[in-house]
Image (cartoon, helix red, strand yellow):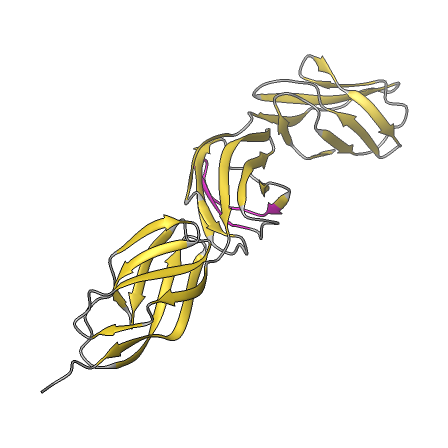
Amino acid sequence: MSISPSQGSTGGGTVVTISGTNLGGAKSVHFGSKTATITANTSTSVIVTSPSGTGTVPVTVTTPGGTSNPLSFFYVGAPFKSSISPVTGVTAGGNTVTLNGTGLTTATAVNFGSASATPTVVNDGQLTVTVPAGTAAGPVGVSVTTAGGTNNGLTYTYVDAPTIVTLDPASGPTSGGTSVTVTGTGLTTTQSVTFDGVPAPFSVISDTVVSVSTPPHATPGTVDVTLTTTGGSATVSGGFEYLATPGI
């Protein structure tokens, strides 16, 4: 005989198929000392719903012809999640997060809200998963499904990519120090603002406003301005012009 799956939740409720011969008219199926609920039966198979249990138990089928040899079924506890890192990412998904906890070896799915992803199991205490796209910016619950059940309790926040609408003023001296107001959207989690790749000091005023002080630049001319948040980056090509210092 064979049994599939050979493991399931300690809480019971796993649908198990037992295959073999002369199984017609099965009267009972035992998981250790407990009786499983038979939902279908033919001469070559018995489908049951496992009862609750712990550890590894023998599974036997009893028919009018007697009781079968035992097969092993392993009860798996529900997973426990202790942390997720990082806790935010772009609404488009695609970034990798790490989940830590216990009982993760048999993980088959990680749900971010209603969106499901297939994890890579590192070991019983850790797995990684590529975040699926979110439906909108904002927090969603994260659940892990294993042979032992499903565990919730962690939160992941989707963040929209930023946009830059205006830079005011859009020019200043090569010596730097110009106070520039950047307006746009999704600016709350701003991590950096660069002028031609050079980081500039900044302050987040609101989700739509960031105040920046331009860094010095060696030569006059226009440069790209890039603002990066946890939701991604926005670049204005030639968005700021460094002006030559007058000479007399």
Task: Please tell me which residue is depicted at 76% across the width and 32% down the height of the picture.
Answer: 18
Name the outermost residue toward the top: 33
Q: Is residue 28 magenta?
A: no
Q: Quadrant of the N terminus?
A: top right
Residue in the foreground of this view, choosing between 64 and 242: 242
Task: Please tell me which residue is depicted at 85% across the width and 18% down the height of the picture.
Answer: 27
The stretch in magenta equals 116-131
Residue 104 shows in the view: no
Name the outermost residue toward the left: 248
Q: Is residue 178 left or right of residue 78?
A: left
Q: Is residue 221 left or right of residue 84?
A: left
Choose top left, top right, bottom left or bottom right for residue 22: top right
Q: Residue 202: percent from the left, percent from the top?
A: 28, 55
Q: Residue 35: percent from the left, percent from the top?
A: 75, 15
Q: Residue 14: percent from the left, percent from the top?
A: 70, 28
Name the outermost residue toward the bottom: 248
Residue in the foreground of this view, choosing between 74 and 19: 74
Residue 226 shows in the view: yes
Q: Is residue 122 magenta?
A: yes
Name the outermost residue toward the front: 248
Q: Residue 63: percent from the left, percent from the top?
A: 85, 20
Q: Quadrant of the C terminus?
A: bottom left
Q: Is residue 47 left or right of residue 78?
A: right
Total numbered circles: 0
Q: Is residue 204 left or right of residue 1?
A: left
In the depicted structure, whether residue 195 falls above or below residue 41: below
Q: Main secondary structure of the magenta part?
A: strand
In the depicted structure, whether residue 172 falls above or below residue 117: below
Residue in the foreground of this view, choosing between 95 and 215: 215
